[in-house]
Image (spheres, rainbow, N blue to C red):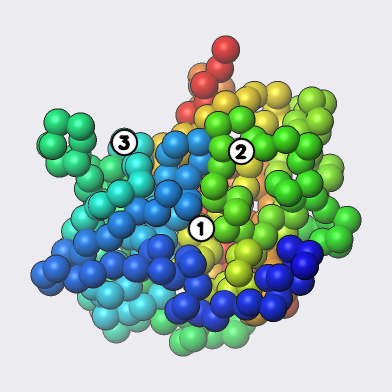
Amino acid sequence: MPEAASAQAVRAGLGDSEFDRDTSLTRRAPGVYDTELSAGWTVISAVNGGYLLAVLGRALADALPHSDPFSVTAHYLTASRPGPAVVRTDVVRTGRSLSTGAASLFQYDDEGQEIERIRVLASYGDLDALPDDVRTTAVPPVFPPMDQCFGPQDAPAPAPGGSTITDRLMLKLDPATLGWALGTPSGKGEMRSWFGFADGRDPDPLSLLLAVDALPPTAFEMGVSGWVPTVELTVHVRCRPAPGPLRVSIATRNLAGGFLEEDAEVWDSADRLVAQSRQLASVRLG
């Protein structure tokens, strides 16, 4: 059975997908949660930053009186690895329309010492309570239909070092941003792709925290290869996404001093801008 048909035949719903299972937590005490970081969301050997943000985002949704992320800022302190982790949250402020919380994820190093991996400050609210008024100059990205785009399964060989996260996702990249895969990068810092889950799960606000950080780095199309670790990532969730695949467009204007920024937009099947992000990442040159 073709991969697309298989995904349609076993369509996961919100709450029972692989993403939901792998971001689940167990409340140990008020504000303290145990979790197991899955090896299924790694790039080479490091756990993907967007997946980590979703784990902490789920903890904050439980700890705060509001359940929807509005603005989430994360600083990535050390590389996370698959295995046990603990998330500690703190309620900073609660209000009628917005609540603010902080969260950190910890693991143990090889010497058994607790080490902080990521620290988050976030504001949460109720997306369904937002007014319908939209005044914008933003327009959806234009790129080919899904059947004219290409995913990891179309590559002639597996990515060096492995990338298990691609097995969990439905990624179909715009051919105009795939020069790097053919050895002819365009020199432009652009990456565009259709985005969804391989098991057919529809998007929700929590999954948008993953979507902004799930594409290959824009540095690849700038002729730079290798790991591009995230230093800081801020995500703004603008509205609850409609069912169906998302379109993700990411651009970099400036790579200097070994760092670059990535500005991402996420559009849903109803042509609405549902999330935006800016990321600062380190580039290993040479």
Q: Which residue in the protein does label 2 denote?
A: 217
Q: Nearer the viewer, residue 159 or 259?
A: 159
Amino acid carrying label 2: it is Pro
**Circles 1 and 2 in contact, beta carbons < 8 Å:** no
Q: Earlier in the sequence, mark 1 or mark 2?
A: 1
Query: Vertical placement of 148 versus 65: above or below?
Result: above
| Quadrant in which residue 261 is drawn | top right
**Image position, residue 249 (x, y; %):** 69, 52
Q: Amino acid at mark 1?
A: Leu
What residue sits right under mark 3 in the picture?
A: 78
Which residue position holds label 1? 210
The tag earlier along the polypeptide, 3 or 2, is 3
Q: Residue 145 — which label? A: none
For image coordinates 49% across by 67% down, the residue present is 18
User: Residue at coordinates 56% horizontally, 37% vertically from top-left?
Assistant: 162
Q: Is residue 221 left or right of residue 25?
A: right
Q: Residue at x 64, y 24 (%)?
A: 224
Query: Which secondary structure, mark 1?
Result: helix
The residue at the far front in this view is 1
